[in-house]
Amino acid sequence: MSAPAKSAVIGQDAIVEKGWLKTHQWLLLRRVSQLSILGLFLLGPLAGIWWIKGNLSASLLFGTIPMADPFLVLQTFFSGHQPELTALAGALIIFAFYFIVGGRVFCSWVCPVNIVTDSAGWLRRRLGLRKSTQLSRSLRYWILIMCLITPLFTGYVVWELVNPVSMLHRGLLFGMGMGWTLIIAIFLFDLFISRRGWCGHICPMGAFYSLVGKFSPLKVSAANRSKCNDCMDCYAVCPEPQVIRPALKGEAKGVGPVIIASDCTNCGRCIDICAKDVFHYSSRFANEAEK
Amino acid sequence: MATKKANNQQALSRRQFLTDSGHAACSVGLLGLGLGMYGEQSKTHAALALRPPGALIEDDFLGACVRCGLCVEDCPYDTLKLARLFEPVTTGTPYFDARKVPCEMCDDIPCVKACPTGALDPQLTNIDDARMGVAVLIDRETCLNMQGLRCDVCYRVCPLIEEAITLNLLQNTRTGVHAIFEPVVHSDICTGCGKCEHACVLEEAAIKVMPRELAKGELGKHYRWGWEEKEKAGKELVPDIIDLPNRMPSNSAEKLNIAPTGGKK
């Protein structure tokens, strides 16, 4: 049928081809992951089952395994504080995990703000809002630098005053207060002002984890790219659509099918939405093998 | 021609890149400045917001605390809270309001043990060494003891009774025959747990625990107490009393020929 009718329901082809469940498989798993991690933290305050204490900034699993956000520990380091071994070990554990599975797996599989921005992105597509303020792609890296430099001057962790990621997670566990205003602001910003503005252009945590996952082995590959029928659905749902093109269309230039860019969040939406099963999870080494 | 076009495109995109980066750098610089200013402002925390035991001094604490809430969750008495956005304490950091729930001074100090970063100093092993704040008898006009009544509640609930708070006997000049038992806080002993403020029977506590930097004065570095120096030296430091000429102000008014107005006369 006509193009506009098709773009109104992204993923229609895939639903017809593979069924609704398969078309939302990774999305559902992602939501399960995000909510169960949150639920695990909530077990303590709500049910008194203290498997894990703390929040995403730092926590203690089963009373023994420390975990800490390496970006935050790095910021405290820049503020002139020598963290205790517990925090350092926790940061190392988390760093190692994301180094292997891909840094921005945090963004798509763990971060609670992802649900907020994904909702805004979904609503944006639904309402057909095309107007978007283009922010510089490098902005988040500048903000990342700012987050690390300002503590050198102020002596304290400046980004944590406003960081909506930790604020939302902490708020859900310890009480939000006025913190909701910030979350609503991000939702409205992504919906009306800038498409994927927060996660894709501003959030310094995303930028940091993108660097952490620079060499991660787990990647999405456009292995069946010859089957691509240019429906553009993957670009429409991808939170970082610029990462797809080199892998999907790079065959003529001798570029391998693996999505190498570390901005990719390994969310798997492209795998879901593709009616032709072009994408699947793979390893970065599969790329070199084919080349 | 194709290559020329490609070069041209590349040059354009380089220019675009530089412009974008310039924009980003400038806006981020402004953002940083704004955040810094907001941070400086939020550093002056509320007089009644007390940090958990072992907390580093405020400046260092804000650099060390990762706002994880582990201290809050390990506090068995739900004393600690994490500050929320726009509250008068830096967002996400732990504090307590002694009037609502004071620190119960656990012997094993679980909050300090829970802290992964050392923002609560693990060197603190004896809770009596904690310096969360210092109690101040802030309103002597409503304090029942200061009016000659025997309330004494703050004195009696103090975990360091007779050390951190003592009662100082004064004559009650209103009745002439009774005593006033003045509660006196000794800041070198007071841990700032807030039990006195919590227990104060008044609608609004007359004794309040404040962050030490607010409650305490500070002597000039050069200043010495004469009597202490005398004790240290074991003798008078100024052996002969210097007799300075006495100039009493009593006659000055007469001399200047001014009629005194007001005052006790």
Image: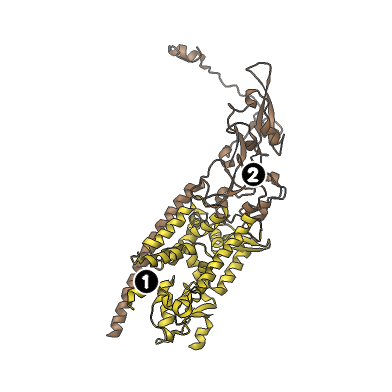
Question: Looking at the picture, does residue A133 appear above or below residue A219?
Answer: above
Q: In this structure image, what is the colour of chain B?
A: brown
Q: Label for residue B131?
A: 2
Residue found at x 44% / y 50%: B37
Subunit of label 2: B
Q: Residue furthest left?
A: B1
Mark 1: few/some/many CA within 10 Å (<14, 14-19, 20+)? few
Question: Looking at the picture, does residue B182 appear above or below residue A61?
Answer: above
Q: Look at the image and tell me whether residue B218 can be seen.
A: no
Q: Label for residue B103?
A: none
User: As drawn, is A155 to the left or to the right of A242?
Assistant: right
Image-quadrant location for residue A135: bottom left
Residue B243, percent across and down?
Answer: 60, 21
Residue A86, percent across and down?
Answer: 64, 61
User: As drawn, is A185 to the left or to the right of B103?
Assistant: left
Disc 1/disc 2 C-alpha distance (Å): 63 Å
- Asked if labels 1 and 2 share a chain, the reply is no
Residue that label 1 marks: A8
Image-quadrant location for residue A110: bottom right
Give the image's coloring scheme. by chain
* Amino acid residing under circle 2: Arg
Residue B3, percent across and down?
Answer: 30, 84
* Amino acid residing under circle 1: Ala
Please state which of residues A38 and A198 is positioned toward the viewer in this rendering: A38
Q: Look at the image and tell me whether residue A286 can be seen.
A: yes
The image quadrant where one finds the N terminus of chain A is bottom left
Image-quadrant location for residue A243: bottom left
**Which chain does the yellow colour mark?**
A
Question: Looking at the picture, does residue B132 appear above or below residue A249?
Answer: above
Question: Looking at the picture, does residue B208 appear above or below residue A48?
Answer: above
Q: Are marks 1 and 2 in contact (CB under 8 Å)?
A: no
